[in-house]
Amino acid sequence: MNKNRSILWQLTFFLAIKKLMNKIVVICSLIAIVGILLLFYLAKVTQPNFISLNEIDSTYIGKTVSTSGRIVAITYSKGNIFLTIYDKNSSISVPIFSNVAKYLDISLRKGQKIVVSGVVDEYKGRLQIVPRKASDIKVVE
């Protein structure tokens, strides 16, 4: 009789632990799904700071910005596209490296006004905006 009680108690304990583990798995799964959805949402709604060209200085190095300007120079080299954009009294280089350039579905020409988003960087003492993906470059005129 004591042996049966012991087995019954162990079985009851095992079932209680199993139910608790199932609840923990469900809760962890829900938290993970909510976290992934939150990250996806934040990636879509957070846009880089839009600033005018003349505001971009060395304090922005390493930061993601969005700006606009007219293309005044285009150079092609080994799959890369190098733009210079100008707005009012300021200009900046926009190197579009081959890993991004190959996905561009737009034609870039001198005189076009574009909006570009990317990371501000410095190359040979000159500031530049480096787009990370093709959708970071949009022709607006």
Image (tube, grey):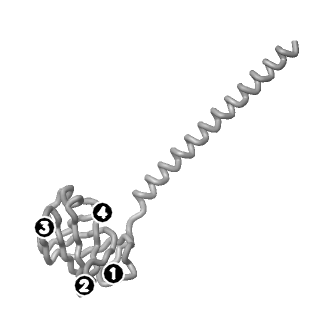
Quarter location, residue 55: bottom left
Alpha carbon of mark 2 to alpha carbon of mark 4: how far? 22 Å
Q: Position of residue 108 (x, y in %)?
A: 14, 66
Q: Earlier in the sequence, mark 1 or mark 4?
A: 1
Q: Earlier in the sequence, mark 2 or mark 1?
A: 1
Q: Earlier in the sequence, mark 3 or mark 4?
A: 3
Alpha carbon of mark 3 to alpha carbon of mark 4: how far? 18 Å
For the residues bearing labels 2 and 1, Cβ distance under 8 angstroms: yes
For the residues bearing labels 2 and 4, Cβ distance under 8 angstroms: no
Numbered tag placed on residue 56 in the rendering: 1
Q: Position of residue 100 (x, y in %)?
A: 23, 60
Q: Residue at x 82, y 20 (%)?
A: 6
Question: Crowdedness of circle 1 by 10 Å Cα count: few (<14), some, many (20+)?
Answer: some
The residue labelled by disc 2 is: 90
Local SS, label 1: loop
The residue labelled by disc 3 is: 77
Question: Crowdedness of circle 2 by 10 Å Cα count: few (<14), some, many (20+)?
Answer: few
Q: Residue at x 77, y 23 (%)?
A: 10
Local SS, label 4: loop
For the residues bearing labels 2 and 3, Cβ distance under 8 angstroms: no
Q: Amino acid at mark 4?
A: Arg
Q: Amino acid at mark 1?
A: Ile
The residue labelled by disc 4 is: 132
Q: Residue at x 87, y 16 (%)?
A: 2
Q: Residue furthest right?
A: 2
Horizontal side of residue 54 vs 4, given as left or right: left
Alpha carbon of mark 1 to alpha carbon of mark 4: how far? 18 Å
